[in-house]
Image (cartoon, rainbow, N blue to C red):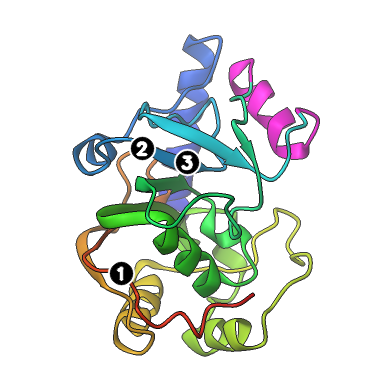
Amino acid sequence: MKNLLRKIFFKIRRILSTESVLIFPESRLAHRYCVGKGIEIGGSAHNPFGLDTLNIDRFDSTNTSFKRAEKRLCGRSLPVDIVSAGDCLPLADESQDFVVNSHVIEHFADPIRTLMEWDRVVKPMGILFMIVPHKERTFDAVRERTTLAHLIDDFYTNAKGPAEDEHGHYHVWITEDFLELINYMISELKMGWILLKVEDRDDKVGNGFLIVIRKIKSRTDRSLTKV
């Protein structure tokens, strides 16, 4: 574990020592699966996908901690196209070909509700593409993993409020934990999904895991969706 974190650290340091800005590579898999026009939740200039997307962020200001960090890394910040919370999107049902994001879902108090909202705006046969921090390869390594029972409770109690973690991470997962969540949503909440791709190490920065879901049908029962 320590050796892996050290390798990631030195890789980033080598990039910084040879370039004036830090920009991580685009995801080959995102270009394969995310075809058409879509939205990116919480996009950043230093971690681009290079897709045809509108960037959605809850703040338009460039003076947030995340935007300041973005500028320090690559000298600029990605413009925000739509100011909105990522779990309550001002978009029509089934209007997007895909939803893409990297290191974002852990910032939501209620990931089940958030995933349902992303599903709502994606067209049938559209894509949910996520890169999620892997507990063992990030600063979350010292934290306890979030259980499925915790996530279910967050959903049914409509969890809200600020994250206790200084980085704004409500939840911490390894790949298997997140797959347990997705399978629960398919079997118990009747999400019309199939898993297309799972990679334990993402093809961008390498400190997360990668999940690709195809929406094969619309949810007919929306009674569980929070208001």
The residue at which mark 1 appears reads as 218
Report the residue at 62% width, 58% height from top.
Answer: 107
Disc 3 + disc 1, Cβ < 8 Å: no
Question: Is residue 211 visible from the viewing direction of this image?
Answer: no
Pick whichever of labels 3 and 2 is earlier in the sequence.
3
Q: Is residue 47 magenta?
A: no
Q: Look at the image and give the residue range highlighted in magenta.
A: 62-76
The percent coordinates of residue 153 (x first, y second) are 60, 89
The percent coordinates of residue 225 (x first, y second) are 53, 78
The residue at which mark 3 appears reads as 40
Disc 3 + disc 2, Cβ < 8 Å: no
For badge 1, the amino acid type reads: Ser
Q: Secondary structure at mark 1?
A: loop
Report the residue at 74% width, 65% height from top.
Answer: 163
Report the front residue among 44 and 40.
40
Q: CA distance from mark 1 to mark 2?
A: 30 Å
Position of the C terminus, as image quadrant, is bottom right
Secondary structure predominantly adopted by residues drawn in magenta:
helix
The residue at which mark 2 appears reads as 204
Q: Nearer the viewer, mark 3 or mark 1?
A: 1
Disc 3: CA contacts within 10 A as few (<14), some (14-19) or many (>=20): many
Give the total number of marks visible in the rendering.
3
The percent coordinates of residue 200 (x first, y second) are 29, 58
